[in-house]
Amino acid sequence: MTGSVANQATPEPSRTPSRAGFLGRLREEYRASDKAGYLFCLPYVAYFAVFTAYPLIFAFILVFNKWDIVSPMQFVGFRNMQRLASDATFWMAFANTLRFLSLHIPLEIILSILIAVILNEQISFRPFFRGAFFLPFVISGAVVTILWQQLFSTDSGVLNLLLYRMGLHGLGWLTDPSLAIYSIAIMATWKNVGFYIVLFLAGLQGVPHELHEAASIDGANKSQQFWKITLPLLNPVVVLVAVLSTIGGFSLFIEPFVMTGGGPAESTLSVVLYLYKQAFQFLRMGYAATIGFALAVMIFVVTLIQRKLIETEQLY
């Protein structure tokens, strides 16, 4: 009798945890993992705040001010924008950039496709050639421009020496105002084509072999298979390369800065190089910030076009 009373007075603890205890532990674990997540994100958030968000906000403030770094800022309202709209040098730099893009983009797309198709075949030393074409992309831009500056030299450049050997006249690759921006486009294409070859090689890996086998059985030759099967299926990669090349072309800076300084007769002055000169040669920080935002708007418009083109990829 006594033992039964004692058992009733001290009930055994339940093996099933209460709902509140379970939720409490779950909440604590969630909070702990949440804190750990915040801590892992903190370095990038700090980096973004210091090197991206703050400069962007500060540049936007500069658009409405006149500032030469030394003197205090002077609020000028929309005067920088009005000046930009009527700045003939800016629009000349914009036209130079468009001329650069008119040769740079087609060259990069055509050469990238052709070389990628060749490197996708079972040729000898294929890994070596793949590495060789990609090598210029990882070399410093300043080193590449100095190298091509020697190749383009009017008196002792290799290109003009080859023309002389063939009985032709040498060209002013970097001294002729009508030719200099296109010479820079050739050099920039040589440097960047390796990266786009990698993209096209990845796209070629996704082309089903069954389509080529079926076309071959139907009597289609290699050329017909390329135009009717391979190239249409590579359309999304073509659009991607075109947009990346366009954005990169708008950011043209180091090539004309090192090779020509924007000359001759400002024929190689790009938008970014003009921005640099306004900011660090003439100390017009507010006006340079205005040019930067105008360039951002141009790139934004191109990005919208890119999105529209990608959305129509199902047409092929």
Image (spheres, rainbow, N blue to C red):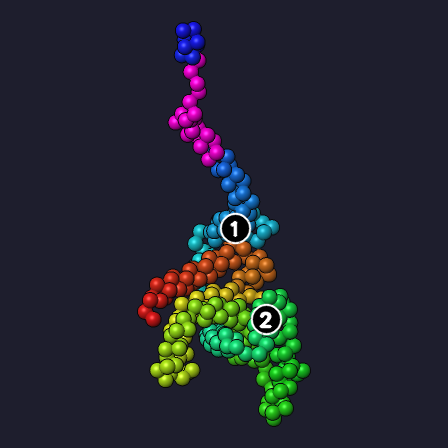
Q: Nearer the viewer, residue 266 or 241?
A: 241
In this view, the residue in front, 191 or 58, is: 191
Tell me which amino acid carries mark 1.
Thr
Which residue in the rendered view is the most extreme toward the left?
315
Q: Which residue is mark 1?
A: 52
Q: Is residue 199 left or right of residue 145?
A: left
| Residue drawn at (44%, 18%) of the image | 12
Vertical order, 261 against 155 (above or below): above
The answer to whether one can see residue 40 in this image is yes
Instruction: Return the residue found at the far bottom.
Output: 167
Tell me if mark 2 has few (under 14), some (14-19) or many (20+) residues whose alpha carbon lies within 10 angstroms of its own.
Answer: few
- Whether residue 155 sits left or right of residue 299 in the image: it is right
The local secondary structure at tag 1 comes to helix
What residue range appears in magenta?
A: 9-30
Pointer 2 residue:
131
Circle 1 Cα neighbour tier, 10 Å, few/some/many (<14 / 14–19 / ≥20): few
Q: Does 299 appear in magenta? A: no
